[in-house]
Image (cartoon, rainbow, N blue to C red):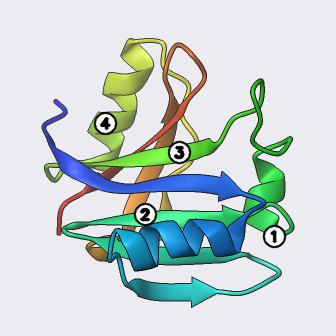
Amino acid sequence: MIDVIGLDHLVLRTNKLEAMLVFYRDVLHCPIERSLPLPIGLIQLRAGNALIDIVTLDGDLGRDGGNPPQQNGRNVDHFCLQIASFDEKELLQYLQSHHIKVQPFAERYGAQGYGRSIYIHDPEGNIVELKPVR
C-alpha cells in the first residue's frame, strides 16, 4: 500500500536561528528557498532533492512543538516521506486497519511544491508526514 520514494523534508525547531542558518546555509551550502516570517516563523533550505525546514520557537509552528530543544525536549518537529501516488480513502483505511491515528489530509508545501499530505505518529510519538511524489 505504501511505497516510500525518499525523504521530502525534515523540520528542526530552534531558538538559535542565526547559528542554524550559518551551519546549514553557509557551512553546508543549503540555500534558502523560502521564508515565512513571524507569526509563522519558518525558513526552508534546499538540501539536494529535499528541504530542511527551520522553525523558530517564537513562531506559530515552533510553539506548537512544545518546550525548547534541550536534553529532554524535542528538536525534530517532524519529517516527511515521499511516497508513490495513492488514493486518499484507501490510504486512510489502510492506516486505520493498523490502528494508526491519522490527522486530516491538508495542502502543504514540500520539496516538490504544494501537495496534499497526511500526518501520522510512530510508536515513539514522532510525527511522520506522508506526501505523494508529484
Label 3 Cα neighbours within 10 Å, binned few <14 / some 14-19 / many ≥20: some
**Could you tell which of marks 4 and 2 lies nearer the N-terminus?**
2
Q: CA distance from mark 3 to mark 1?
A: 16 Å
Residue nearest the viewer, comparing 126 with 21: 21
Q: CA distance from mark 3 to mark 4?
A: 20 Å
Q: Which is closer to the viewer, label 4 or label 2?
A: 2
Q: Quadrant of the N terminus?
A: top left
The disc placed on residue 52 is 2
Residue located beneath label 4 in the image: 91
Across and down, in percent, residue 7 comes to 26, 50
Label 2 Cα neighbours within 10 Å, binned few <14 / some 14-19 / many ≥20: many
Across and down, in percent, residue 121 comes to 53, 28
| Dot 4 amino acid type | Leu
Q: Is residue 65 above or below residue 71?
A: below
User: Which residue is rendered at x = 74% and y = 76% of the image?
Assistant: 40
Q: Regarding mark 3 in the picture, which secondary structure is present there?
A: strand
Residue located beneath label 3 in the image: 78
